[in-house]
Amino acid sequence: MFNIGGGIRGWVFRVLVLAAGGLLLYTWFLPWWQAYIEELKEIAIIIRPWAFDNFVPPDMVYLIAGVEDAMPAWFFTFMWVYLGAVVLALLVSLFVSSAKGINIGRFRISLPTALIGAAGLSYIGVVIAAVIVISMKAGMFWDAPLQGKVYVEESMEHASYVMTSLQTGFYLACATGPILVVLAILRRFIVGKA
């Protein structure tokens, strides 16, 4: 079942998969979206794929009504289990034999290709889901765009512009899923026939 051989081409492919997996982990810890409140002169909210971090001081919570219910209680655990499954799939794909495969209609896909492709496609799904959820949350709090500026006014004394923006982590995540899918597609050309 496990095959650690593969020659130079096999090891080159493993390094490429490890690099893509490293990029996935790097994007996992970076902020994907943030809200900057000008009155506070600081970042108020940061969203990562696994967390919704609120940095608004208690006396300024009026700017973000309902922030304590931003994400369901199970979300954090679910996303970390997801990350563990993706990392495990990528690690197993490095050493599992190409002789094992999955039939999809008339096509046969090797198990390593299927694992890497599934990891990439699932991460593309996470990125798409993140955009949808972030758009809904930004709209719920301030009727704000995904990226842009909105004026929030609780009263004459309590008002501020809120700047919202997607961050570098999001853009890198947008590239990571497709990179894994491309690696899965190119695997047999890089490694060669078993």
Image (cartoon, rainbow, N blue to C red):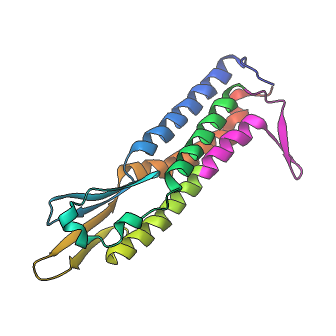
Residue sitting nearer the eye, 90 or 56: 56
Where 37 falls versus 112 (above or below)?
Answer: below
Please state the horizontal and vertical placement of residue 60, each as a whole percent of the image: 19, 67
Q: Which residue is painted at 52% across and 32% down in the image?
A: 19
Q: Residue furthest right?
A: 106
Reply above or below: 100 against 114: above
- Residue range of the region highlighted in magenta in the rendering: 96-122
Residue 36 appearing in the image:
yes
Q: Residue at x 19, y 72 (%)?
A: 161
- Assign the N terminus to one quadrant of the image: top right
**Rendered residue at 23%/77% (across/down):** 152
Look at the image and say whether residue 103 sits in the magenta stretch.
Answer: yes
Residue 68 at x, y = what percent? Answer: 37, 64
Visible residue check, residue 145: no
Q: Name the spot of residue 70 as percent of width and height, x first.
A: 41, 65
At a point 26% along the width and 56% down the height, the residue shown is: 55
